[in-house]
Image (spheres, helix red, strand yellow):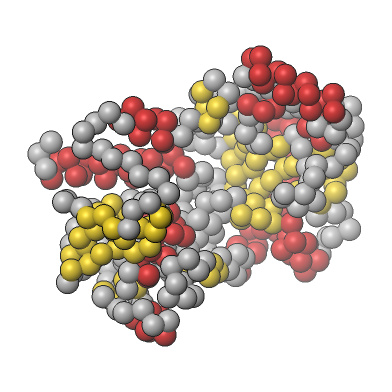
Amino acid sequence: MEGRTAAAILENPGGVQQGAAEFGILPRADFNDGDNEGSGFFEVNQKAGLRWNTAKGFLKPSRHRANLRVLTGAETEQLILEGKSVRGVRFRGALHEGTADGEVLLAAGAINSPKILEHSGIGRPDLLRALGITVHHSCPGVGENLQDHLQIRTVFRIQGAPTLNTQASTFLGKAGMVLRYALTRSGPLAMAPSQFGMFTRSDPALATPDLEYHVQPLSTDRLGDPLHRFPAITVSVCHLRPESRGSVHVTDSESRAQPEIRLNYLSAEADRRVALKAVRQARRIMTAKALMPYRPQEILPGPAHVSDAALMTEIGSIATTIFHPVGTCRMGVDDGAVVSPDLRLRGLERLRIIDASIMPRIVSGNTASPVVMIAEKAADMMRKERNL
């Protein structure tokens, strides 16, 4: 794990940390010790300057096993059902159909898992019939309960410190980053955009932090746009426990068609209140004495936006997903749940769902490692059931 490398990009990241401390957000050595409140450097899933993903960590070491066959170019279209039992998977691409001797494990994520279920005739009957999809199993909760973390990207122009904006704006700067990565597997190309972060509360009365900051030594008007050509940092903040709920549903019987994703960000009044508090908190932190040498100037949302109405309008313009969709195949014991606590789809045999879609509520942090934990727990349950 490598996480303490931001100093190579932002000359004094401690300035942000010292500034946050002036407002009670104290330095924390480890976000993973049971209490994440405070500021510090993120640990990342990385090895030798490369992202360490589950394919490298779990799949590659197991490729030699006789009971494992890896297919590529075989996109899942639908599940194959016989009555109330899932018997296999129909693919598009290299293989047209595959059958399972044991269980089918669906792990396509919070967007594609409900999409595959609905194209298989599993979901809300009225929606499926309207699209001409035969209903094989009524499960109205499929595709509902969609949640995500919305990041509000405040941007501040600074002076007296290099950022990636200026480093990446010249040929020599880019060449230097490439050379450094090639020779040492370090530097900007070996890092996540956010190295420094903070967990804090939007209200002192809360028992645990409900805000997460990602501080980045770069800035753009919008994600995907070119970097600004002046030195600036992004102080991105997101509400960790949003109340807004959305949905994802298919819109066509053709499996190639993309589903309709309705995230309904900030539809809950409580989320709008927290969003306003979050931006104002970010602004306060950037007025800290420790940051005065860098003369931060607010670029986004812009200092002219002061009233609740004006600021909320700008938040709608600068906020984006932080890519944490969850909840669309909710786990539970009530009639509205999609999967039971053992991750089996309720009312069907031989099918489990193992991904972020099963989360009843979004976690108060990033979702990648919790999904690995879900998979580990599922594997433990299946081994125990089989006395392995």
Report the label total.
0
Q: Is residue 357 left or right of residue 101?
A: right
Where's residue 222, x and y in %? 75, 52
Q: Is residue 313 left or right of residue 329?
A: right
Above or below residue 293? Residue 223 is below
Residue placed at 21% from the left, 37% from the top? 67
Quarter of the figure that contains the C terminus = top left
Where's residue 327, x and y in %? 42, 59
**Front-most of residues 126 and 82:** 82
Above or below residue 201? Residue 24 is above
Residue placed at 67% from the left, 21% from the top? 181
Answer whether residue 328 is visible to the viewer in this image. Answer: yes
**Front-most of residues 323 and 337:** 323
Furthest residue toward top: 183
Answer whether residue 333 is visible to the viewer in this image. Answer: no
Where's residue 258, x and y in %? 52, 66
Furthest residue toward left: 387
Residue placed at 62% from the left, 38% from the top? 198
Where's residue 163, x and y in %? 80, 31
Residue placed at 62% from the left, 65% from the top? 266
Above or below residue 24? Residue 81 is below
**Front-most of residues 304 and 160:** 160
**Front-most of residues 317 and 306:** 317
